[in-house]
Amino acid sequence: METLEVALGDRSYPIYIGVGCLDQANLVQQHVVGQQVMIVSNDTIAPLYLEKAKALFVGYDVSWVILPDGEKYKDLDHLNLIFDALLKHRHSRSTTLVALGGGVVGDMTGYAAASYQRGVNFIQLPTTLLAQVDSSVGGKTGVNHRLGKNMIGAFHQPQCVIIDPNCLQTLPARQLSSGLAEVIKYGLIWDEAFFSWLELEVDNFAKLDMAVIERAIYRSCEIKAEVVAQDERENGVRALLNLGHTFGHAIENCAGYGEVLHGEAVAIGTYMAADLSKQLGWLTDADCVRIEQLTQRAGLPLIPPPELSASALRDAMNLDKKVENGKVRLVLMTAIGKACVTLDFEQHQLEKTLAAGESLCK
């Protein structure tokens, strides 16, 4: 087992990574506050892992709530199911919430923990690759609004994150690929050597090569922990983690939440960012080819669904949290392994990227 720390002073917390972590009650119990535990999961994950999770908390007053599975349920209406369960079972301010599932469960549980009685503790037990490498770390929590993704939320750090790669044994191939979009992102914004390693090893993800998967999870979490420690509330360098996300969130919103998986939308958005970076002279043709080939080998799409118009995507992007003085700020790449947040592009260049379709990056 490997351990990383997200260094945030008196709010620092560990990330435990290793096969079999979900069988080690001692890991999680040291981070429980009080005697009450509320496990939040969904109707896909609960049949697989709820009993295992409950076994971690023998001796505690454990209750649970099961949400419907899917991005389309990540809203205020379904968030209330968590509050209903907390109140029904009379959970106090010393309760500990436990997020057992993917990014949707983690985001909703974290936001419930941030809000319930003005803030209680929570623990992340991520079961998807996307949650393990990205959304479970860093304290971003929230829900979607019909007009924009993650527009309602709070920063609220967990007590710990416990990552068991064995959970990926039950993950559908499409979900595994979705998580790889975030792994690739770390190489593109921070570590060219990691990107190059992924080019060599990406085929082994489909084979569930645990040595490869554990290394990818560790390096992804290591990068994110470093970034979050420098900039917890996204006032600077943390914004680089949004590579592909402004385009991607617009795609998710326009397609209907859940129709395009988050990682798929991020992959398309990253390719769009590569196209705009190339227009600006920051990426070479060879860089774009590398990004395109790795994305395709990861089983991810490169272009938006054809029914999504450039104008609809542009309108959705204008509702993004990162709009500044009426202009969208984007994360673009200056090289593989280096990125920046910029307003330094012309509207016609953005329009060209949005309208490019199959000719993107060509």
Image (spheres, grey):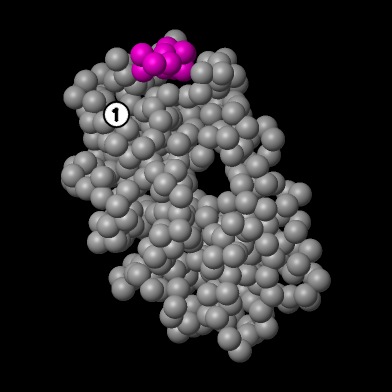
Comparing 12 with 278, the one in front is 278
Please check the rendered image and state whether residue 238 is part of the magenta-colored stretch, yes or no.
no
Q: Position of residue 351 (x, y in %)?
A: 47, 13
Q: Main secondary structure of the magenta part?
A: helix
Quadrant of residue 256 within the rendered picture: top right
Q: Quadrant of the C terminus?
A: top left
> Local crowd at mark 1 within 10 Å, few (<14), some, or many (≥20)?
many
Residue at 53% x, 75% y is 52
Type of the residue with mark 1 = Glu
Q: Position of residue 296 (x, y in %)?
A: 32, 33
Please check the rendered image and state whether residue 353 is part of the magenta-colored stretch, yes or no.
yes
- Look at mark 1 in the image and give the residue it sits on: 292
Q: Which region of the structure is painted magenta?
A: 350-360
Residue 310 showing in the rendered view: yes
Residue 15 showing in the rendered view: no
Total numbered labels = 1
Quadrant of residue 97 within the rendered picture: bottom right
Residue at 34% x, 21% y is 275
Q: Position of residue 361 (x, y in %)?
A: 32, 19
